[in-house]
Image (cartoon, rainbow, N blue to C red):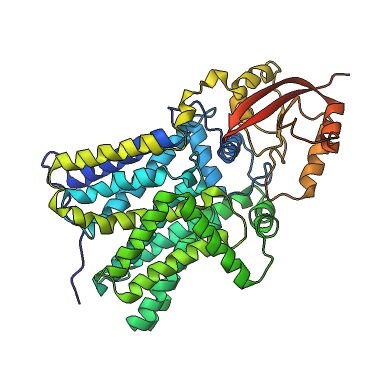
């Protein structure tokens, strides 16, 4: 049996341990890229992405005793809200805590990119996988504005990809208990964050099962491996279910996170063939819209096909992993531009296979520093959000409306017409209404509850996005609104490339 491949020596610096130097490089790569690319960064006035604001609103409300799904309805996974609860401990009226989480996740992502490159490269050039991967992935249009479930999933997916490649490389590496437990836990974390991101881990376990069962003829060990993986997944369910059971919210967890996502958000119509064709079309659309990702995937696939250190079945496993990811992400029929970000996990693999070509010139610090500098220039040029740096926090409509809202002691507000435009965060107020935002997975009971609360005058203020966006007669919902609330002011502000009208309304007095 071939000897196991160890991570190659990257640097020989007597002043610091090698591992510390590598982590510092990964931290610097992630922090530099995310500082420019993520709207959660201190370089930006605020993150105006409606989903990110909803996560932070729920996380902040959790600090004050509210429970996701039971008290506040949004259909992402509970671990995403726990993460934002911890972020709100650092900054409750902004995204600095979220930015620190992003940098932590990005550092792990870069570290495993270097580990992957070190399987194929000698010397300092393997370190280039960190800035290269960060530069290419975080400037993708699919990265959007930062703080997506897909972004936080990237390091978890890359660890699984690394372990799969490591097992298959040179056909000589064991499937260890620690590896299985680790990836089971990571799969469980993804399950309780956004279960459509489980495709790679599903393929990981399926491929290792068939590898052990058929090619290594270890029948008992194959089933034993599945057991350890599932044990890791089950371990993550214990604290989640315990939290919701303690708060008498298991029914709400089932209703919102599972039922609504499966039967209200997903489009399960059509046969299997037509849905697979749609998945393929959406994957192609994603690779076209994200040119750097498409190029990396194409180059990576070509190099994997020629990599003699990977057996033919190993190359097939990687193709299966990509296919499973696509089916899990788009098989439900829903599509948003950020859904393709998890495919950024293949960028470090492409970098790992390209970097050996740098063996001849990437010696010493100068070429590495030059390459890292070029990566930062790339980040500065191609970030989709740099134009937002010119905005001043004090001039944002959220800040101006918050000043008016906070003139009323203990004011209650409703953000209507969008997911969450940031008014709860700007005003420092927790929602006191279960259907505090509009989601894509809600039923008619949500709108009925909002209208009933409006008729009852349950809110001191209501902010409506695009209140002026109708043709002809005023919609019935808006007629009800104006019967009980009066317009205070209307402001326009750009959001996601569109000028949006934000209307502030105040409850009418008798």
Residue depicted at 45% across the width and 47% down the height: 152
Q: Percent x, y for residue 389?
A: 46, 26
Residue 124 against residue 506 in the figure, above or below: below
Residue depicted at 71% across the width and 37% down the height: 417
Residue depicted at 44% across the width and 64% down the height: 322
Compared across the picture, whether 389 is left or right of 63 comes to left
Residue 54 falls in image quadrant: top right
Q: Percent x, y for residue 67?
A: 63, 43
* Residue 156 visible, this angle: no
Compared across the picture, whether 252 is left or right of 106 comes to right
Residue depicted at 29% across the width and 74% down the height: 311
Residue 321 against residue 404 in the figure, above or below: below
Q: Percent x, y for residue 72?
A: 67, 41
State which quarter of the image contains the C terminus: top right
Q: Is 32 in front, or is 510?
A: 32
Residue 303 against residue 39 in the figure, above or below: below
State which quarter of the image contains the N terminus: bottom left
């Amino acid at each position: 049996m071939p000897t196991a491949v160890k991570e190659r020596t990257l640097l020989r610096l007597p002043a610091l341990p090698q591992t510390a130097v590598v982590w510092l490089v990964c931290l610097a790569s992630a922090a530099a890229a995310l500082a420019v690319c993520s709207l959660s960064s201190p370089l930006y006035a605020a993150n105006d992405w409606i989903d990110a604001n909803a996560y932070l609103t729920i996380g902040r409300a959790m600090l004050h005793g509210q429970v996701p799904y039971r008290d506040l309805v949004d259909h992402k996974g509970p671990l995403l809200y726990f993460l934002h609860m911890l972020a709100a401990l650092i900054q409750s009226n902004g995204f600095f805590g979220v930015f620190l989480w992003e940098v932590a996740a990005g550092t792990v992502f870069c570290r495993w990119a270097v580990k992957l490159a070190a399987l194929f490269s000698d010397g300092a050039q393997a370190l280039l996988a960190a800035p290269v991967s960060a530069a290419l992935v975080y400037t993708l249009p699919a990265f959007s504005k930062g703080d997506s479930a897909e972004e936080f999933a990237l390091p978890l997916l890359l660890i699984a990809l690394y372990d799969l490649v490591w097992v298959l490389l040179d056909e000589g590496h064991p499937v260890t208990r620690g590896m299985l437990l680790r990836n089971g836990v990571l799969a469980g974390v993804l399950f309780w964050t956004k279960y459509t991101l489980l495709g790679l881990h599903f393929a990981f376990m399926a491929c290792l099962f068939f590898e052990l069962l058929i090619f290594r003829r270890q029948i008992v060990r194959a089933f034993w491996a599945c057991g350890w993986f599932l044990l890791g997944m089950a371990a993550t369910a214990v604290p989640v279910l315990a939290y919701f059971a303690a708060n008498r919210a298991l029914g709400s967890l089932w209703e919102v996170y599972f039922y609504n996502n499966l039967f209200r958000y997903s489009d399960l119509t059509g046969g299997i063939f037509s849905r697979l064709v749609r998945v393929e079309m959406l994957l192609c659309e994603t690779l076209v819209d994200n040119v750097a990702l498409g190029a990396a995937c194409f180059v990576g696939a070509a190099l994997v096909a020629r990599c003699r250190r990977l057996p033919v079945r190993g190359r097939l496993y990687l193709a299966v992993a990509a296919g499973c990811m696509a089916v899990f992400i788009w098989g439900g029929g829903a599509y948003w531009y950020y859904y393709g970000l998890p495919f950024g996990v293949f960028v470090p693999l492409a970098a790992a296979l390209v970097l050996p070509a740098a063996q001849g010139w990437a010696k010493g610090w100068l070429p590495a520093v030059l390459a890292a500098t070029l990566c930062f220039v790339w980040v500065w040029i191609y970030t989709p959000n740099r134009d937002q740096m010119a905005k001043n926090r004090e001039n944002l409509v959220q800040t101006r409306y918050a000043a008016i809202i906070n003139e009323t002691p203990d004011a209650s507000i409703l953000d209507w017409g969008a997911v969450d435009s940031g008014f709860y965060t700007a005003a420092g107020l927790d929602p006191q209404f279960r259907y505090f935002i509009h989601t894509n997975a809600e039923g008619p009971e949500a709108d009925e509850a909002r209208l009933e609360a409006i008729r009852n005058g349950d809110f001191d203020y209501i902010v409506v996005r695009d209140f002026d966006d109708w043709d002809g007669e005023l919609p019935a919902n808006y007629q009800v609104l104006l019967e009980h609330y009066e317009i205070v002011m209307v402001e326009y502000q750009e959001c996601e490339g569109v000028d949006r009208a934000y209307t502030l309304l105040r409850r009418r007095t008798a």
